[in-house]
């Protein structure tokens, strides 16, 4: 069983449409893929249709990656198999998603002040109907020849946390996020908790508090964690009684990782689906 529990589509900052993501996951030989767009469930319907149209036996886990902030540090909370119609969580997702638009416009304004001829129209065209974020702004900077790659835009000079053109967005308190996702029947996994190259991370003591508040797991095997970091996180998960997952965090051509580059143990996946009551994984009938 090959299980990848973290992937993005054009519903947020990935470059595969939800249907392409499903077909690519099947072509990669994955058995299970989770659709985890930032702060949105907008890709679910198309992805589910694509799964039902497949010959093979790919299972789709519906999810989202919720933008959170704790004590000034941004972090990402993966949520799986929650009820997308549960109104309290849906309203919170909408707040975060809606605030992404004025925030992206703010980053465009800062870049223009810095002499970059970027426009909101350009960023809006790149983002399409997706939940707009820094990777879309970064793609505009690549188009303009300001930087060579999307990653190159994530520096102090441009869009990194605290960078010259960085603007904050509304983000959830992760304790609220855990509670809200549980209330919608879902399961939470703290995404890339020690990805230091993305900016500040929270201390282990805070992860312990999240665990005590009902966090289900942490993402251990991830491209942004080196081997010693994974070993440390695996030990922390065992100590705190958390599930340990692995996943690609696939973003199509916007990032270098491949679907299925890191995977989750089948027993861990079974436990996640056992705990979830908000939705069931989708398979071809
Ligand atoms: P946002 O949610 O708009 O603040 O953008 C965060 C997203 O930017 C993440 O989900 C990643 O997809 C992307 N990102 C963050 N840091 C980096 C980085 N160093 N290189 C490439 N992409 C990054
Ligand atoms: Fe992303
Ligand atoms: Fe993330
Ligand atoms: Zn992600």
Image: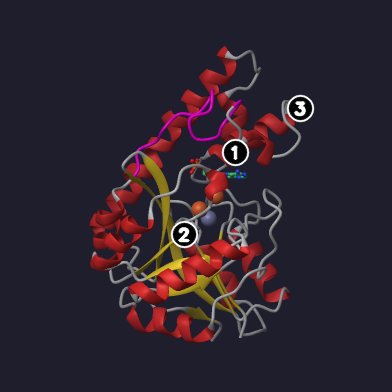
According to the image, label 2 marks what residue?
A: 191
Q: Is residue 160 magenta?
A: yes
Mark nearest the camera among 2 and 1 is: 2
Taking the image as drawn, is residue 138 in sight?
Answer: yes
Q: Quadrant of the C terminus?
A: bottom right
Q: Position of residue 34 (x, y in %)?
A: 52, 69
* CB under 8 Å between discs 3 and 1: no
- Which of these two is toward me, 57 or 175? 175
Q: Residues within 10 Å of mark 2 (few under 14, many from 20)?
A: many
Residue drawn at the location 56% of the way across and 25% of the way down: 120
Q: Which residue is mark 3?
A: 145
Give the residue displayed 49% in from the left and 61% down from the top: 36
The image quarter containing residue 271 is: bottom left
Label 1 element class: helix
Residue 54 falls left or right of residue 240: right
- What colour-coding does the image apply? secondary structure
Closer to us: 201 or 188:
201
Relative image position of residue 28 (x, y in whole percent): 72, 74
- Quote the CA–CA distance across marks 2 and 1: 21 Å
Give the quarter the ligand 1 occupies.
top right
Q: Please, is residue 123 above or below residue 3 in the view?
A: above
Q: Is mark 1 within 8 Å of ligand 1?
A: yes
Secondary structure at numbered mark 3: loop
Residue 92 colored magenta? Answer: no
The answer to whether mark 2 is within 8 Å of ligand 3 is yes
The magenta stretch spans which residues? 157-171
User: For the point 49% across and 35% down, which residue is it?
Assistant: 161
Residue picked out by circle 1? 136
Q: Residue at x 23, y 66 (%)?
A: 183
Most frequent secondary structure within the magenta stretch: loop
């Amino acid at each position: 069983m090959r299980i990848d529990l973290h992937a993005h589509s054009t519903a947020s900052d990935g470059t595969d449409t939800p249907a392409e993501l499903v077909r690519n996951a099947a072509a990669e030989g994955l058995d299970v893929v989770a659709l985890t767009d930032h702060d949105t469930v907008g890709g679910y319907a198309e992805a589910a249709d694509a799964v039902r149209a497949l010959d093979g036996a790919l299972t789709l886990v519906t999810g989202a990656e919720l933008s959170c902030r704790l004590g000034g540090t941004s972090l990402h909370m993966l949520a799986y198999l929650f009820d997308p119609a549960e109104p309290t969580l849906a309203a919170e997702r909408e707040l975060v998603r809606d605030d992404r638009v004025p925030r992206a416009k703010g980053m465009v304004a800062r870049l223009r002040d810095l002499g970059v001829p970027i426009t909101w129209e350009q960023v809006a065209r790149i983002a399409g109907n997706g939940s707009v974020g820094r990777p879309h702004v970064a793609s505009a900077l690549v188009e303009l020849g300001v930087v060579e790659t999307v990653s190159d835009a994530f520096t102090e000079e441009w869009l990194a946390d605290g960078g010259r053109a960085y603007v904050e967005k509304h983000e959830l308190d992760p304790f609220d996020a855990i509670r809200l996702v549980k209330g919608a029947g879902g399961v939470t996994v703290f995404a890339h908790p020690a990805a230091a190259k993305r900016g500040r991370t929270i201390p282990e003591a805070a992860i312990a508090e999240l665990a005590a508040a009902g966090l289900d797991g942490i993402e251990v095997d991830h491209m942004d964690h080196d081997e010693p970091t994974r070993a440390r996180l695996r030990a922390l998960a065992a100590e705190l009684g958390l599930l340990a997952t692995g996943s690609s965090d696939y973003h199509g051509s916007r990032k270098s990782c491949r679907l299925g580059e890191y995977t989750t143990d089948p027993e861990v996946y079974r436990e996640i689906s056992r705990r979830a009551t908000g939705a069931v994984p989708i398979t071809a009938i």
